[in-house]
Each structure stands twice: as C-alpha cells, then as structure tokens.
Amino acid sequence: MKRSKTDGISFFERNLSLWVILCMVAGVLIGKFLPAIPAELAKFEYAKVSIPIAVLIWLMIYPMMMKVDFASIKNVGKNPTGLYVTWVVNWLIKPFTMFGIAAFFFYIVFKSLISPELAKAYLAGAVLLGAAPCTAMVFVWSHLTRGNPAYTVVQVATNDLIILIAFTPIVALLLGVGGISIPWNTLLLSVFLFVVIPLAGGITTRHLVIKNRGEEYFNKSFIPKFNNVTIGGLLLTLVLIFSFQGDIILGNPLHILLIAVPLVIQTFLIFFIGYLSSQKLKLSHDVAAPAGMIGASNFFELSVAVAITLFGASSPAVLATIVGVLVEVPVMLVLVKIANRTTSWFPAQASVKREREISPVKAYEPLARGGFGDHVLFATDFSEMAANAFTCIEQLVAQGARKVTLVHVQDKTELEQHLMGRLEEFNAQDRGRLESLKQTLLNKGASQVEIEVCYGVPFQEITRLIKERNVRLVVMGMQGRGFAGEFFLGSVSHNVARHSVAPLLLIPGLR
C-alpha cells in the first residue's frame, strides 16, 4: 500500500506554498497593470484598518475559533507538564529567539543585501510571527503525528487565551527594542479586531449550534461548511496584499529567499526545544509532538492582520509575515516526518511518569487468582489514561495472571477519510508499542502475552476478540468525558460494557 507523509492534510493545505506563489504573481500583476483596483480598495479604511482586508481576515480566523473547545480548559490540571512546556516555549522563548535570529541575519549576515530601512521592517514582520503560536494548522500537524487530540485542544485553547494577554506587550517590547515605534492603541485595536471579536463569535456560535443540534452535527456538518470560506478568504487576502506589495517584490525579488532563511531556522529551533524538552521530561510522544509543533508553527493569519493594521498593506513588514505563510507547510511536513521517525526516543506509554500512586498490589489478588486471571484482555489507545490502566495489568501479572492479550484497534472512522494510505505504517508503529508493553509484562513474570492490532470500529473489534478468545476479564482506561468520542478508546468503554460477555474493569483517568 502506497504511503504518503501528506495523507491526512487537504489538497489545499498540502499545496499552500504553491497557492501563495500563484497569489503573489496574480497580486503583483494586478498592482502593475491594474493599479486602479488596489488604489480604490485602499480608500475603504477606518482607523487605519483596511475594511476589505479586515473582512477577509475575519473569514479566515472566525472558523478557526469555532473549532476550539474552550470547555477543555477545565482539564488543564490533569497532567499539566506538557502544557508547561508549550507555554514556556511559546511565550518565554519563541518571541525572543525569533527577534534575535531575525536581527542577526537582517542586520549582520545580509547587511550588504538589505537596506537598514527594509531590515527594520522585515524584523517587525518576523517579530509578529514569533509572537503568535499556531491555533489552527496545529490540529493538522498533531493529527499527522498521531498526537493526543484532547491534549492538543487544551494546548491550543490555553494559547488562544494567553494571546489575549501576552501578545500585545511582547510585540510592543520587541519592536521597541528594535527601534520600531508603534502606537499602543493601534496594536490593542488589532488584537481586539482579529482575536477578541472572532474568539467571542466562535465561542458563541459553537455553544449555540451544539446546544440546538448536537456536537456530532457541529463537527461533521456545520464546521465543514466553512472550509471553502476560509480558503477563499486566505487566497483573496493574499492577492489583495500582493497587489499593494508589487513595487517591493519587483524591486527586491531575492529578499523573499533572504527573509525565509531566519524563519526556517527559527521553526526548526523551536520545534526541537519543545520536542526534546518533552523527551527529557519523559512525556509521551502523543503529547511531545504537538508541543513541538504548536510553537514551530505560526498563527500567520493574526500576524498578517496586525502587520497590515500597524504598518499598512504596502509595508515590507507585511511581506515578511507572508513569507512565513510561504515556508510554513513544507517545513512543517519535514518536522512531521522527523517526529514520526523518532517515536522510539520516547517512553512506552506504560512507563510514562504517573501522577498518582499505583493501587496496592494485594487489591488485585482476588481477580488474578479467582479465575479472572486465566485470560485478561487489555485494550489500549496508548493514551495517558491507558497507561494508567496498564498498571492494573502489571499488578494482575504480579499476582499470577496466566495469560494477557494486548489489543489496539485502528479506528476506521479516523482513518478512512484521510489516513488509509498510512495504515501499514500505523500498524507497524503500534505493533512496536504493544511489543514494548509485552516485554514489560514478560519482565514481571507473565507466562503468556499475545498482541493484536485490529482495524475497524473499536468496541466491535474488542467485543469480537472477547468472544473468540474466551477472555475472562477485560481492562480498559476510562476517560470520563464526552469530547470527540470517535477518537478516544475511553469513549467506547460504555459500548464494550454493554456487549462484553466477560467482566469489564474500568480504570479512571489521572486526576
């Protein structure tokens, strides 16, 4: 079966760099041969904000805000270590390394190629990119690296809230250090227009639609309606911006490549800071990969919007933010490939540091020696809650359980739409994870351990194996929440309980 590293990312997203180049060409041609169009559009302005561009940017940002489940904030206290990594990298490291790297290249390395005035403008654009961690495409990167979707949502939701507080002072500080004077009221207006308003609109729309039609309708029917709106908004925004940028691009075509150099270096640096920090902290790969991706990727829609508001659509600072759009996808796909090839750097889920004590060994003795230990089935999705449940299996083995079957089900509802081309890759990766768990049990004295990687509807595959293998006891982690049920093993525990012919032991998640 042919596999592609870009399975799971839409045709538009996969070719985003191509669309940016085409929009650049179209915009420059319009600006050169039809200058009346950008000149007329430039008249529609209020408080130095271009009304046409503001509308288009709202069309991009508003659907993104609807996708974020801010109710997930209540789960911040559960396993917060990965969130600490995300927050520290995104807000205490990333903006400042971006400033340092960009200043080094624009003012020193490329001094003979870039004038001081352009260097200052390009630095401003780079700062705006560095101060805005990704809030939308990170879901794609997390999906491609098999990140924990629930954890990624919490990471994104908390960053969106931090943007409200931290973005303005960080940008003002770094631009001030760079000798760039900006009016605070204009910067605050930018955040209000392009973060607060779309955020409030997204939260309200999400709440009302889910309340009246349900979460399944919202995710599968309502949100997809906005896909083309978002795409159209981005493309039209780029064409319009490039129509104002024609003179700069035609006069300095090499500068696009020069701007890209520090942006690419910054992306790799920030990814590895977050990714390797997670590894040192012994976080699981499904938390570490999104933690690295969310900082490496940028909220370029916000960066573009603020650059236009602060400096005008024809400013070189805007060009710098758009180069960020140009390099984003190809660079992030390289990082996805790196993350997927380095899963072995991270501990198996069963050995991930636990945040509460394992239940006393003797608590499992009646189960292990009362006939239930003849054959125990453990179903795992390799999440933190499954790792916690695996401690029960370890104790059952320690108390004499004779046979254990370790099961992971590749969820067809998750794979069918985008990721079928990577099924063989996922099977091999997950079989390796199960082998690691198997070795753990063998080291603890287990006499017989089998592994199964299945494809289908999780609860159906689990209940089928229970019947076919004469299982005496089933152990599963229990999520205890209803978010995005099709992705989490914990969401199928209720169905397994209803259909299983063997007793089911549910282990609550960490608190």
Image (cartoon, rainbow, N blue to C red):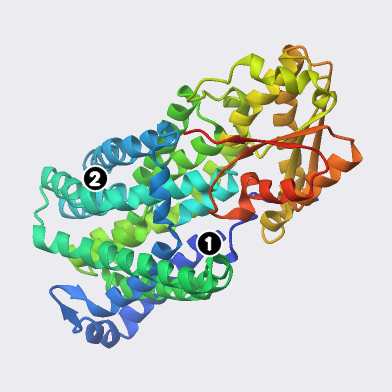
- Would residue 2 be seen by someone viewing this image from the given angle? no
Q: Which mark is residue 34?
A: none
Task: Give the answer, above or below, for where 55 lies relative to 115.
Answer: below
| Residue 23: percent from left, percent from top | 43, 71
| Residue 365: percent from left, percent from top | 72, 17
Q: Looking at the image, which residue is at 34% across and 48% down?
A: 159
| Residue 485: percent from left, percent from top | 60, 54
Secondary structure state at the residue bearing disc 1:
helix
Give the image quarter of residue 478.
top right
Q: Looking at the image, which residue is at 29% across and 37% down?
A: 97
Q: Looking at the image, which residue is at 55% across and 45% down?
A: 480
Secondary structure state at the residue bearing disc 2:
loop
Q: Which mark is residue 112?
A: 2
Q: Looking at the image, which residue is at 52% across and 23% down?
A: 353
Q: As rendered, which of 417 and 354 lies closer to the eye?
A: 354
Give the image quarter of residue 377.
top right
Q: Residues within 10 Å of mark 1 (few under 14, many from 20)?
A: some
Q: Amino acid at mark 1?
A: Glu
Q: Amino acid at mark 2?
A: Ser
| Residue 471: percent from left, percent from top | 85, 34
Q: As rendered, which of 71 and 192 lies closer to the eye?
A: 71
Cα distance in 3D space between marks 2 and 1:
35 Å
Task: Give the answer, above or below, for where 183 lies relative to 352.
Answer: below
Q: For this view, does 164 lie left or right of residue 296?
A: left
Q: For this view, does 499 lie left or right of residue 315?
A: right
- Ranked by sequence position, the earlier of labels 2 and 1 is 1
Identify the residue position indicated by label 1 in the image: 13
